[in-house]
Amino acid sequence: MGLSQTQVADALGITFQQIQKYERGANRISASKLYDAAKLLQAPVSYFYEGLEDTDGGLDDGFAQRMTEFVSTPEGLELAGLFPRLEDRRLRRRVVDLVRAMVDDEAP
């Protein structure tokens, strides 16, 4: 899109080395950082998922659409930013279990 890694990194508040790790797939990018990148590039979040539905990566079940919907809400974006800050893996699991139970309770 015409931006250098350094320009993207500076705009996102990270190092260009981190951008390189994201590009190579060495590090995962948080949903909130992905959202920030999409805003910077003036592209929808789904831009980063283009072509994945054609692969055998298991994303043809609407994953990209659900992720886009998730970070498109203020609550989803906030949760996406906060969740990775939970360092205790058991606590993260409990949050997921709590949300799953809440969703299951709403099912008809």
Image (tube, rainbow, N blue to C red):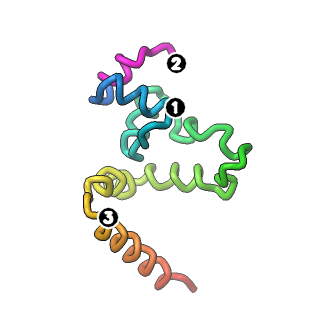
Foreground: 90 or 103? 90
Image quarter hosting the C terminus = bottom right
**Disc 1 and disc 2: Cα gap in Å?**
10 Å
Circles 1 and 2: CB distance less than 8 Å? yes
* Image position, residue 88 (x, y; %): 26, 63
Dot 1 crowding, Cα within 10 Å, few <14, some 14–19, many 20+: few
Looking at the image, residue 105 sits to the left or right of residue 82; the answer is right
Q: Main secondary structure of the magenta part?
A: helix
**Disc 3 and disc 2: Cα gap in Å?**
36 Å
Foreground: 38 or 5? 5
**In front of the other: label 3 or label 2?**
3
* Image position, residue 2 (x, y; %): 49, 13
* Three-letter residue code for mark 1: Ala
**In front of the other: label 3 or label 1?**
3
* Image position, residue 9 (x, y; %): 34, 24
* Three-letter residue code for mark 3: Arg
Which of the 4 quarters of the picture holds residue 15?
A: top left
* Helix, strand or loop for disc 1: loop
Residue at the spot 67% in from the left edge and 58% down from the top edge: 61
* Image position, residue 57 (x, y; %): 66, 49
Residue at the spot 35% in from the left edge and 25% down from the top edge: 17
Numbered badge on residue 89:
3
Q: Is residue 5 magenta?
A: yes
Which residue is the site of mark 2? 1
Comes first in the chain, label 3 or label 2: 2
Numbered badge on residue 43:
1
Q: Which residues are magenta?
A: 1-10
Comes first in the chain, label 3 or label 1: 1
**In front of the other: label 1 or label 2?**
2
Numbered badge on residue 74:
none
* Helix, strand or loop for disc 3: helix
Circles 3 and 2: CB distance less than 8 Å? no
